[in-house]
Amino acid sequence: MDKIIINGGKPLNGEVRISGAKNAALPILAASFLTEGTSTYTNVPKLQDIHSIKLLLSHLGARIETDADRIQIDTRNARGHEAPYDLVRKMRASVLVLGPMLARLKKAKVSLPGGCAIGARPIDLHLKGLEQLGARISLEHGDVEAETDGLKGGEINFDLVTVTGTENLMMAACLAEGTTVLNNAAREPEVVALAETLNRMGANILGAGTAVITIEGVSSLNPVTMEIIPDRIEAGTLMVAAALTHGDVLITHCEPEHLGAVIDKLKVAGADITIGDHTIRVKGPDTIQSADIQTMPYPGFPTDMQAQYMVLMCVADGSSLINETIFEKRLIHVSELLRMGADITISGQTALVRGISSLSGAPVMASDLRASASLILAGLVATGETVVNRVYHLDRGYDALDKKLAGLGADIRREK
């Protein structure tokens, strides 16, 4: 199992290119199952989660060819309707094949998914919505079994904002008879990217990016060629890294409009940020200022950036409150930051972070994807050596982050 070793204290400088977004690529690749033919996707990141969804689609009968960041998916012979536990246990996004399978084949059997240990992320809202579209659903031995005589449009009210739930129901509704309305829908850029892909396939979707999405069902969808949007969380992580190390980094091939909340908070923290055409330049301040955050659904501050931002606050001037409202176990990286000397007190879902002059290198253990990134960031500013163990989580969601940081001047290496 790999580990990453960092010797901190080096400012990051230079230029770095952002890879494609994992959270956009996964539902888009799953949407290929709605068509019969060959779809082509470019700017696909090289990640373990992408490998997992490719294995799953192959198991369902799709033929997949990969060349660098380009993936072709031929679904003409894809007739499988079972996604077994061995293929879905490591990645929650595997549930995204449920809607497409049910819509195209009228039946599906999907093992309840796994993923990061950041708390309960039930798929009840997915199942409730599919039942409202005419699916018959049962839970048997850890599997979701669904069938339908034909999905029919309806009005679905999400009790909570759910990104994958919005995506699953949107995909299923594309081949349903009549009109489907999703109320309290997720507004994330990745949802918009999926809607644009589906519309390119021949779907009729309006309102993506707002809280109300309307889908007019069509009889069939066609293969498509699409480019995956840039990963806003990777961009945000590198922005924090630049500010944290008092560096000067130009981040290219990104979408600044997807990062409004992160940009605003980094400016409050003292970073000098210049927005260009698909670029963001971040100059770190001499003194980092404390600033509170509360995670919220998009366009609020993303939960996927909370752990990274907490590291910035660990070495800020003053105290800050970080309130996690999305996942109940997304503060478990705090225990590892405490090992590095951070001054953090947790009360419920809120962390009080008292800034200190510097962190100290230590062996730490990554508990989930974003925690992995936060511990690497902590290592960048810690005195001495930091060893981040169990970095397979990192490889699920970041395309060669260690190499990108090394290219900016970090003293970082990966070892078996």
Image: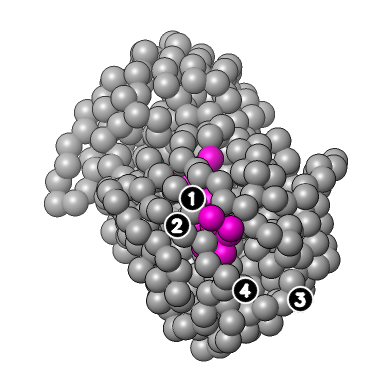
The residue tagged 1 is 320
The amino acid type, in three-letter code, at marker 1 is Ser
The CA span between labels 3 and 4 is 10 Å
Query: Is residue 311 shown in magenta?
Result: yes
The CA span between labels 3 and 1 is 29 Å
Residue 81 position, x and y percent, is: 35, 45
Which structural element holds mark 1? strand
Residue range (magenta): 301-318
The amino acid type, in three-letter code, at marker 4 is Leu
Q: Is residue 382 above or below residue 350?
A: below
User: Does the CB distance between marks 3 and 1 fall below 8 Å?
Assistant: no
Residue 306 position, x and y percent, is: 49, 51
Say which label, 2 or 3, has the lower sequence index: 2
The amino acid type, in three-letter code, at marker 3 is Gly
In the rendered image, the quadrant that contains the N terminus is: bottom left
The CA span between labels 2 and 4 is 19 Å
- The residue carrying pointer 1 sits among few (fewer than 14), some (14 to 19) or many (20 or more) residues within 10 Å by Cα, namely many
Q: Residue furthest top?
A: 178
Q: Is residue 122 above or below residue 407?
A: above
175 on left or right of 233: left
Q: Is residue 39 above or below residue 234?
A: above
Tell me the tag on residue 409: 3
Say which label, 3 or 1, has the lower sequence index: 1
- The residue carrying pointer 3 sits among few (fewer than 14), some (14 to 19) or many (20 or more) residues within 10 Å by Cα, namely some
Say which label, 2 or 1, has the lower sequence index: 1
Instruction: Determine the residue positioned at 76% across, 54% down.
Output: 282
Number of marks in the rendered image: 4
Tell me the tag on residue 380: 4
Q: State the residue in front, 55 or 17.
A: 17
The CA span between labels 2 and 3 is 28 Å
Query: Is residue 359 shown in magenta?
Result: no
